[in-house]
Image (spheres, helix red, strand yellow):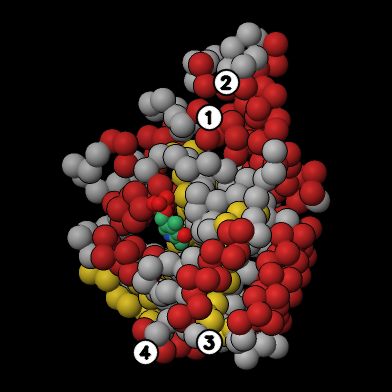
Amino acid sequence: MIRKLNFSAGPAALPEEVLQQAQEEMLDWHGHGLSIMEMSHRSKEYVSVAEQAERDLRELMQIPDNYKVLFLQGGATTQFSMIPLNLLRDKKTADYINTGVWSKKAIAEAKRYCEVNIAATTEHNNFTSAPSQDELKLNPDAAYVHYTPNETIGGVEFDYIPETGGVPLVADMSSSILSRSIDVSRFGLIYAGAQKNIGPAGLTVVIVRDDLIGQMLPNAPTMFDYSVHAAADSMNNTPPTFGWYLAGLIFQWLKRQGGVEEMQIINQRKAEKLYAAIDQSSFYANPIAVANRSWMNVPFTLADAGLDKAFLEEAEQSGLLNLKGHRSVGGMRASIYNAVPETAVDSLIAFMAEFERKHG
Ligand SMILES: *Cc1c(COP(=O)(O)O)cnc(C)c1O
């Protein structure tokens, strides 16, 4: 068996060690004679798996006790609705920072429920930077401020956490959670679809300060109420048991790697060497402001777009998969999440140099 190098934006690469462990446990989980997928979510065995995953995530991110950790379904996209429904409370407006495709989708959904103030946008430069703190026009009466710390498609990442003067800060961390240390207490709510940097698709993690929940708009669906999920330990209905279990294995794997602090060092090194390879060549280019270049998603173009097809074909022949850029951007994108080893980035850089030598 040869495992290829997977640069997919999501669902994305998973650590080989974790896949092997899941394989070993698949038919007979810890001597119980059945797989984890076949167990009741209310069995003491499964509950212990679920609780351990939460404890490990709390430890990895140093989540304060006054935050709930919820294991939900519906992807980050469902959070685009749940956030206004739960966090507007008696307010009528929310602030949104627009840095690209995912911000825009969150904004479009919020507009169904409230007045959206665009606190800043980088549309004028085609979303090639993040706005600075000085550029944010925040409304002190907003229910919350929403932003996307890492735009997965554009490859733009904030190099700071916005200061919101007491207004709860909400972050779509789908593609950057666990990639570097953050101070969770700066946020009102953090959410992430699992399929980029946590685990398999089908699980969504929400971390929310407990004073912000319990005031959902009347008539909204029960399953959209954070306080319902918090009261039921994310088991108001059947949770995505396999995804939750696998996320738990990944949290343990992260702890074995040295935690988020160590991943941060590795991720920075991976990203910097890939951007350096792009910058030192006139064949490859990345348009993002240097301070806002994503550590997780690295888009790049070839000087001659006519070579895109050959690039992707030859990459695939060399075992480098899923490098095609998002259809809205074109070119290439290498997603280099936690589970993508530094050696895979080295292989990509070597392939790029060789391709340039042959075709440049
Ligand atoms: C992938 C992604 C989403 C969408 O996630 P789903 O789980 O597919 O709903 C939203 N925001 C960001 C930043 C993403 O990367």
Q: Nearer the viewer, residue 75 or 190?
A: 75
Name which residue lies at 55% across and 34% down: 244
Whole-percent x, y for residue 9 in the image: 51, 58
Badge 1 is on which residue? Answer: 242
What amino acid type is highlighted by mark number 2? Ile
Label 3: element kind: loop
Whole-percent x, y for residue 117 in the image: 30, 75
Q: Earlier in the sequence, mark 3 or mark 1?
A: 1
What amino acid type is highlighted by mark number 3? Ala
Dividing the image into four equal quarters, which quarter contains ligand 1?
bottom left
Name which residue lies at 46% across and 31% down: 240
Q: CA distance from mark 3 to mark 4?
A: 24 Å
Q: Earlier in the sequence, mark 3 or mark 4?
A: 4
Q: CA distance from mark 1 to mark 4?
A: 43 Å
Residue 164 in view, yes or no: no
Badge 2 is on which residue? Answer: 36
On residue 303, which mark appears?
Answer: 3
Determine contact: label 2, label 1, CB under 8 Å. Answer: yes
What amino acid type is highlighted by mark number 1? Phe
Q: Is residue 274 left or right of residue 83?
A: right
Determine contact: label 3, label 4, CB under 8 Å. Answer: no
Of badges 3 and 2, nearer the viewer stands: 3
Asked if 190 appears above or below 134 in the picture, the reply is above
Q: Is residue 77 left or right of residue 251?
A: left
Of badges 3 and 1, nearer the viewer stands: 3
Q: CA distance from mark 3 to mark 1?
A: 43 Å
Label 1: element kind: helix
